[in-house]
Amino acid sequence: MTNYTSDDQWRSFQTFIATYLAGMLHPRDVFTISRTSSVMAPLAEFRCDAAGQVWFGMGAKSWSDEDGASIQVSRDQANQVAAQTVQVLRNFADLDDPRDLRLSGSGPASSVAVLAKAGFMNGDYDEPAREAAMRARMTADIDTEGDTIDAEARAAGQRAFEGTRNGNIAAVAFAAALAGLRSWVDPFSPTPKTGYLVGGGAPREAGD
């Protein structure tokens, strides 16, 4: 069980949101944040349109096509958008911890690991859209300052990389450490228990 505080968990969740947004490039990309106990409209929804622009909506409005129901947000300002989203969730949705949230996504962005500054990954995808999402996340300027959970998990990934010189194995170690330190579940970054490497390849590729 993680010993990190609620503030630490929210800071980690902020990093997660920023990294997810950085990879939303495809018109099928949709990311929703809901209460775990609710079947109503999501608390927040991000979606990418045909022009590659990201839109943000809240509650019932997130499902509306009416003018003004959603606002356009800049992928280049993912850190600011993530911080504001966390503030809204904490202050207005009255949530104590990210563990009270359910995350869902569709499109290429949801099929690539959500690891901040994931330089460990060296996945080789057959699908250009997944490749683009991964590269966008790896090169994005994600703010991890003050994210102690990310720092500890990254250290685990670095140790794995130093021992194996394999980016995919290091990414698995990074994701596994995050899974153990966070109070909430990232459904988009497979850990060793899933049988798939975070970089996108099958386990047999680990020795390549």
Image (cartoon, helix red, strand yellow):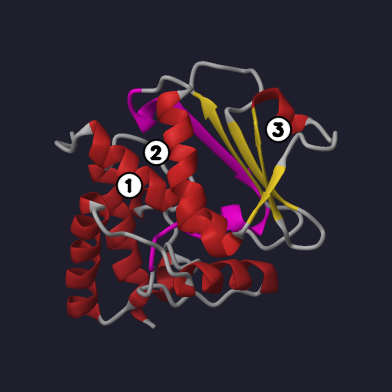
Other-residue count near label 2 (Cα within 10 Å), few / some / many at <14 / 14–19 / ≥20: some
Determine whether the residue tagged by mark 1 lies in a helix, strand or loop.
helix
Judging by the rendered image, the residue that carries numbered circle 2 is: 185
Q: Is 59 contained in the magenta span? A: no
Judging by the rendered image, the residue that carries numbered circle 3 is: 62
Judging by the rendered image, the residue that carries numbered circle 1 is: 12
Task: Identify residue type, mark 1.
Answer: Ser
Determine whether the residue tagged by mark 3 lies in a helix, strand or loop.
helix
Res. 161 image quadrant? bottom left
Q: Residue at x 47, y 53 (%)?
A: 80
Distance between the Cα atoms at labels 3 and 1?
24 Å
Front in this rendered view, residue 117 or 112: 117
Q: Residue at x 36, y 61 (%)?
A: 143
Distance between the Cα atoms at labels 3 and 2?
23 Å
What is the residue that sits farthest to the right in this orientation? Answer: 66
Residue 146 location (% of width, % of height): 24, 54
Res. 145 image quadrant? bottom left
Whether residue 203 is situated above or below residue 119 in the rendered picture: above
Q: Name which of mark 3 and mark 2 comes first in the sequence.
A: 3
Residue 182 location (% of width, % of height): 28, 41
Look at the image and give the residue range highlighted in magenta: 96-117
Other-residue count near label 3 (Cα within 10 Å), few / some / many at <14 / 14–19 / ≥20: many
Res. 63 image quadrant? top right
